Image: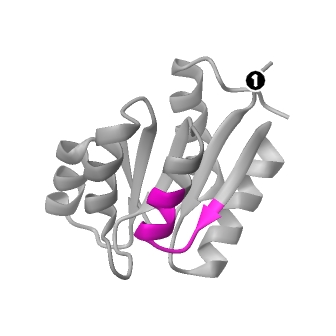
Amino acid sequence: MQLARILVVDDEKDVRNNLSSILSRKINCEIKKAANGEDALEELRKAKFDLVLLDIKLPGLSGIDVIKEAAKFTPETRILAISAYDSYEIADRALEAGAVDFLHKPITPETIELKIKDILTKIGKYWPK
């Protein structure tokens, strides 16, 4: 069994830690974290990830830019875009750039678990704890 590798990207430390905690309690996976778009791309260049939970509004390189750049060298990585901005335009831009789905903050643990389960099941990497 090869564990899913997940990268959690958010500029808010509490959000990064909360998402990581939810994932580690519910899913057998390896988790890495990044605080900005540049660090996210560096992590994606260093190792293969199955899934990225990516905040859209980041300091420096935006989440949309990360999605576009990541698609150039790791197109198999699924990206779940996340934003506190409740805007169809932002969701559409994320999906057009290559995200597989979009969630609006705040996200309940149940919602994130179901979404992650769905994405990882489709690629054969979902193993609940």
- Rendered-image quadrant of the C terminus: top right
Residue type, numbered disc 1: Gln
Residue at left 30%, top 70%?
Answer: 62
Residue at left 65%, top 24%?
Answer: 125
Residue at left 21%, top 47%?
Answer: 97
Judge whether 52 appears above or below 62 on screen: above
Report the front residue among 45 and 21.
45
Judge whether 77 appears above or below 84 on screen: above
Query: Looking at the image, how many numbered discs can be counted on the residues?
Result: 1
Q: Which residues are magenta?
A: 33-42
Callout 1 environment at 10 Å: few (<14), some (14 to 19), or many (20+)?
A: few
Q: Name the residue carrying label 1.
A: 2
- Rendered-image quadrant of the N terminus: top right
Q: Quadrant of residue 126?
A: top right
Q: Is residue 39 magenta?
A: yes
Report the front residue among 117 and 62.
62
Point out residue 53 in the picture as x, y percentages from the top left corner.
Answer: 51, 53
Residue at left 80%, top 36%?
Answer: 28
**Is 123 placed left or right of 31 in the picture?**
left
The residue sitting at the left extreme is 89
- Name the dominant secondary structure of the magenta segment: helix
Q: Is residue 100 visible?
A: no
**Is 77 placed left or right of 125 in the picture?**
left
**Is 128 placed left or right of 119 in the picture?**
right
Point out residue 71 in the picture as x, y percentages from the top left corner.
Answer: 31, 41
Q: Is residue 28 magenta?
A: no
Q: Quadrant of residue 82?
A: bottom left
Point out residue 86 in the picture as x, y percentages from the top left corner.
Answer: 28, 68
Point out residue 72 in the picture as x, y percentages from the top left corner.
Answer: 29, 40
